């Protein structure tokens, strides 16, 4: 009965949401400018060219995703996975696609532990056991099958050309390659491509011949090339030879999945984001629900009181993430328990009744019932929108390239809770809900988000940054929706991050929060928190903004 009620409530919300979209259909039918914003100017140019040539936002997203695999190899990928939110302006529907990596069939709960149950350093991040089965190629082909309007070979061809003819490295990229030299040098294939004897410098032409050949084969033979063709064989054999556990069935069985996004309300807005196996939308929704109980407009953006509220909302939400969340195909947890307005009200009342830091020892006790990843946002002139975040996990993933493929492989297995309570690369802890299991997806923090106002895409955003992705998106939303900032100001504003454990408030350099320590918070200053690539509807047009925290990003408006 409880299940039926939950399903009814969920469907009712989706139904009401769709009705609101339909009632404002006339608004979104009118043509407007299109915008592409990504982490790399060449990928942005690829996407905007597709739109100029008559492709839709979905075509542009596919083309951008393949191009980023070439020009932004630290996170853009075909050897990893991710999530996208897809808004179809014609049908007025929004859905998400989960093309997250899955654990290999032979994966086991204790695979990263020694005989004494101690974590073996580096095994989940830089070994042949570190990778999940990549989902990006399947994800892009699924999106194309359902939404594409341009032949996919045309969408992959800019990536082929960039890999074959090469592109000029920016200063940032050249330095980043040099910084990761040791990591690249551990694998002969990676070393061959990414290590230069005299070090890289700005303006060097960077070619990826093997990757170009792989992309050409994919373009010619389709998604099966990656999952059962020459590419699959090359990856599986190389991994087998080097102690990995990939099998043919792992690749044959891989399937990305279309899913309903997690949609909730915040003041007058409908906010849709990613649900499990990403925790992004859930933590975002829980945090916003808590904050909705306060008169947010009465606070100053940089005040101690506002930042304390923000911190406590994050702490409660991240604590519940750690305790309860994992791939929904393997756990029965009812997420409405932590995303309900009622639960948020209870948590908000605890924050209200306390003047300093709240004790959160047992998440859920109040129930009444490398900063690497990359995000791009696209809207076309018909209002179709894509919010896509995908990743190899840490910078350049595992650093392993299977011989002859040119494909950097992910190290997403580290996003599992490899031992209960043991922090992963991002310091996140997890419970049994996120333990390693065969064919399971590791819990993610990726938060591709679309905010709707009166049924029309209003704000499209997302970020890299591991666990800080969620707090970054949360603050970008609050900056726009509560503090009326324009998209540049909202993106540039300094951020904070708290993920419950470690019990530390991270503050971006230059943000002044004097007195926060007196409220009981231990603080650490960080150079950077997140990096958003967003589009905002403002004064009758869409405006894109590529975060300035790192160079090379670009937004292009197409008329
Ligand atoms: N690999 C980072 C994330 O998925 O959250």
Image (spheres, helix red, strand yellow):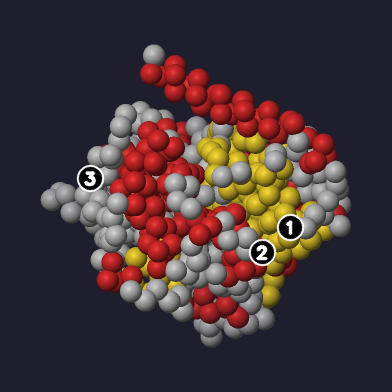
* Mark 2 residue CB less than 8 A from any atom of ligand 1: no
Residue at disc 1, secondary structure: strand
Which is more toward the observer, 386 or 55?
386
- Label 2 environment density (alpha carbons within 10 Å; few <14, some 14–19, many ≥20): some
Answer yes or no: is residue 218 visible. Answer: no
* Mark 3 residue CB less than 8 A from any atom of ligand 1: no
In the image, is residue 558 above or below residue 369?
below
Point out the image quarter for the C terminus.
Answer: bottom right
Q: Residue at x 68, y 32 (%)?
A: 20
- Residues at circles 3 and 1 in contact by the CB criterion of under 8 Å: no
In the image, is residue 498 above or below residue 194?
above
User: Who comes first in sequence, dot 2 or dot 3?
Assistant: 3
Mark linked to residue 538: 1
* Separation of residues labelled 2 and 3 (CA atoms): 39 Å
The quadrant holding residue 68 is bottom right
Mark linked to residue 362: 3
Residue furthest toward the left?
A: 116
Frontmost of labels 2 and 3 is 2
User: Who comes first in sequence, dot 3 or dot 1?
Assistant: 3
């Amino acid at each position: 009965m409880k299940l039926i009620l939950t399903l009814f409530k969920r469907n009712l919300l989706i139904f009401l949401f769709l009705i609101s979209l339909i009632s404002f259909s006339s608004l979104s039918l009118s043509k407007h400018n299109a915008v592409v914003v990504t982490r790399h100017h060449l990928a942005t140019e690829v996407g905007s060219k597709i739109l100029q040539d008559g492709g839709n936002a979905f075509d542009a997203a596919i083309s951008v995703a393949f191009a980023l695999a070439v020009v932004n190899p630290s996170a853009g990928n075909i050897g990893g996975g991710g999530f996208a939110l897809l808004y179809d302006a014609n049908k007025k529907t929004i859905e998400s696609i989960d093309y997250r990596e899955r654990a290999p069939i032979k994966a086991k709960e204790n695979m990263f532990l020694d005989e004494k149950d101690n974590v073996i350093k580096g095994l989940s991040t830089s070994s042949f056991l570190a990778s999940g089965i990549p989902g990006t190629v399947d994800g892009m082909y699924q999106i194309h099958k359902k939404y594409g309007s341009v032949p996919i070979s045309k969408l992959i061809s800019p990536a082929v050309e960039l890999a074959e003819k090469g592109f000029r490295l920016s200063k940032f990229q050249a330095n980043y390659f040099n910084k990761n030299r040791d990591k690249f040098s551990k694998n002969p294939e990676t070393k061959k491509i990414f290590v230069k004897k005299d070090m890289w410098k700005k303006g060097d032409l960077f070619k990826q011949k093997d990757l170009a050949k792989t992309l050409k084969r994919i373009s010619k033979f389709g998604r099966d090339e990656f999952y059962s063709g020459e590419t699959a064989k090359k990856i599986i054999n190389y991994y087998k030879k080097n102690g990995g556990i990939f099998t043919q069935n792992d690749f044959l069985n891989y399937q990305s999945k279309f899913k309903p996004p997690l949609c909730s309300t915040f003041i007058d807005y409908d906010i849709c984001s990613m649900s499990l196996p990403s925790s992004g939308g859930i933590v975002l929704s829980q945090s916003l629900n808590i904050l909705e109980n306060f008169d947010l407009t009465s606070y100053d953006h940089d005040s101690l009181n506002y930042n304390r509220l923000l911190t406590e909302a994050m702490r409660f939400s991240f604590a519940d993430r750690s305790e309860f969340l994992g791939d929904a195909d393997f756990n029965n947890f009812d997420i409405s328990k932590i995303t309900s307005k009622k639960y948020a009200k209870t948590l908000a009342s605890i924050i209200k009744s306390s003047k300093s830091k709240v004790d959160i020892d047992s998440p859920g006790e109040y129930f009444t019932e490398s900063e690497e990843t990359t995000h791009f946002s696209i809207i076309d002139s018909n209002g179709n929108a894509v919010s896509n975040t995908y990743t190899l996990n840490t910078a350049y993933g595992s650093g392993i390239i299977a011989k002859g493929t040119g494909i950097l492989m992910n190290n997403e297995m580290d996003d599992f809770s490899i031992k209960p309570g043991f922090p992963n690369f991002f310091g996140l802890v997890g419970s049994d809900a996120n333990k390693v299991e065969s064919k399971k997806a590791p819990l993610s923090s990726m938060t591709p988000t679309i905010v709707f106002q009166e049924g029309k895409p209003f704000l499209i955003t997302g970020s890299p940054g591991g666990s800080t992705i969620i707090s970054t998106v949360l603050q970008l939303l609050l900056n726009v929706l509560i503090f009326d900032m324009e998209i540049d100001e909202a993106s540039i504003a300094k951020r904070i991050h708290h993920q419950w454990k470690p019990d530390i408030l991270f503050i971006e350099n230059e943000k002044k929060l004097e007195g926060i320590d007196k409220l009981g918070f231990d603080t650490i200053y960080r150079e950077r928190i997140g990096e958003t690539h967003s589009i905002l509807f403002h004064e009758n047009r869409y405006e894109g903004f590529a975060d300035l925290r790192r160079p090379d990003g670009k937004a292009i408006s197409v008329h």
